[in-house]
Amino acid sequence: MGVGRALGVALVGLNGYLVEVEADIGQTLPNFVLLGLPDSALNEARERIRSAAHNSGLPLSRRKLTVNLIPASLPKRGTGFDLAIAIASLAAAGDLRPPLGVVFLAELGLDGQLRPLRGVLPAVMAAVRAGRPDVVVASGNAQEASLVPGARVHAYSSLGQLALELGADPKAVELPSADPVETASQAPPAVPLLSVPDLRDVAGQSEARAAVEVAAAGAHHLLLVGSPGAGKTMLAERLPGVLPDLDDEGAMEVTAIHSLSVDPAAQRSLIRRPPFESPHHTASAPAIIGGGSGVPRPGAASRAHRGVLFLDEAPEYERRVLDSLRQPLESGEVVVHRAAGTAAYPARFQLVLAANPCPCGQGTGKGLECTCTAQAKRRYFGRISGPLLDRVDIQLAVRKVGAADLGGTTPGESTAEVAARVLRARAHQAERLAPYGLETNSQVPGRLLRGRFRLDAGSTSSLERAMTANTLTARGYDRVLRLAWSIADLAGLDRPGADEVGQALLLRQPVAAA
């Protein structure tokens, strides 16, 4: 007998850290000691592992078993260490001879079944980055783990099956009589996919459709203000359809985030389409930003990474919830601090806000049907703070849809037609911004806008007048320039002129009183 060893992975946010599992069998009375900052779910692993090993024909030693998780200073959580602890414990007793450098990621059932885990994709990514590409997972996680480039995935359905591969006595090993995990983890029956909502369904609203196209072209944030039924939600729901597919890096990031949130056996392919998240206005700050007990989990903002976060009826959200979005809008990352640890999740999303102009929703145009007082209007729209609004590139008043719009015989352009223009605009800006490590116009910093991409004085004269009149902030000045570049990219121009800057400025007019 000696010290048995195996490797696992501890996840903190999307960051994974290799954990060495040591097991040693002492000379004292039966006991199972688990060291290395385990949480309550991990502490319960002792009984799961004893039962799983016993029902696999490989009972643990009846003497004191000490298991140490290294580094001891890193908090460990969840059930993903079950298999690594079991392998190290059986290796310490001489029952198994596991190869060095293999990472074990699975939960154990009492009957010895290997159960799939949430978050196996970022865990396997961490193992590969650490130079440990050989990974053992439950059969239900095999397809998801195989999505990681360079990973050598070995999938098993039970501890007994794995033990036979690692040198256990075939006469002693017992395999489960049934395999409910495999049955449960089979791919769900094919369900016809719903068609992507088409922009052609939106009646009229030529200005709003153009704003959605510009937002898609440069990954700009968008605020739509209008009366109920004007089509704000329809427009927001159709924005993801005109966005380009995610590249390999983006698809891996998005899939890794969703791996932490969905059924562990459901993630079977990379997510190629930009995600769309639309939380209810009663959602809490942890639900949108991330949080929860223990190590924080990703919220809607992170699940919308490289996609769209849509907040309908934005003034109905708590103000502190809305203001919590200010930091990720600037940095593209959510950092959540809790007593159990700090987790960072990517959150570079497009924010789309939809709002009525007042509580009754009729305060548009002349507002003859509006029953709200001026104070009620200010209080209602004032729930969206000025600093948050200043970070929203496009602010548009959506007019009411008239009978002529509904009865028109000429439909607007389809999502496919608009998406083709957006794709060309993205390719144009990607070529221009690649030397600076940037992807879209919304990411261009002010130093480049006023340096390498500086426009001539004639093109920016309207912005100078707006700043002189105190209707445009310094941050707003830069955001209008970014919009102008996106409009130029859609038009196939090398750089924006006075017309494009003017159009961009119109897309950023205050709409609180629309």
Image (tube, helix red, strand yellow):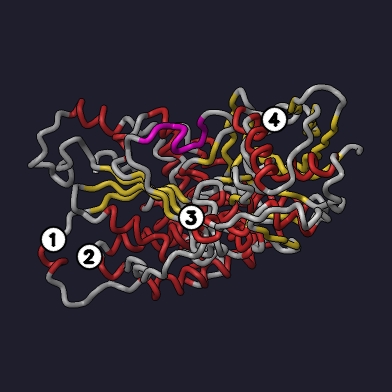
Residue positioned 18% across, 29% down in the render: 374
Cα distance in 3D space between marks 1 and 2: 8 Å
The segment highlighted magenta reads: 283-292
Q: Which residue is tagged 2?
A: 204
Q: Which residue is tagged 4?
A: 75
What's the mark number on residue 69? none
Residue positioned 10% across, 34% down in the render: 371
Q: Which is nearer the N-term, disc 1 or disc 3?
A: 3
Which amino acid does the dot numbered 2 rest on?
Answer: Gly
Cα distance in 3D space between marks 1 and 3: 31 Å
Direction from residue 61 to residue 430 in the image, left or right: left
Q: Which residue is tagged 3?
A: 307
The crowd level at tag 4 (other Cα within 10 Å; few <14, some 14-19, many 20+) is: some
Q: In the structure shown, which secondary structural element does the residue marked by tag 4 occupy? A: loop
Q: In the structure shown, which secondary structural element does the residue marked by tag 2 occupy? A: loop
Q: Is residue 300 visible?
A: yes
Q: Is residue 459 visible?
A: no
Cα distance in 3D space between marks 3 and 2: 25 Å
The residue sitting at the front extreme is 171
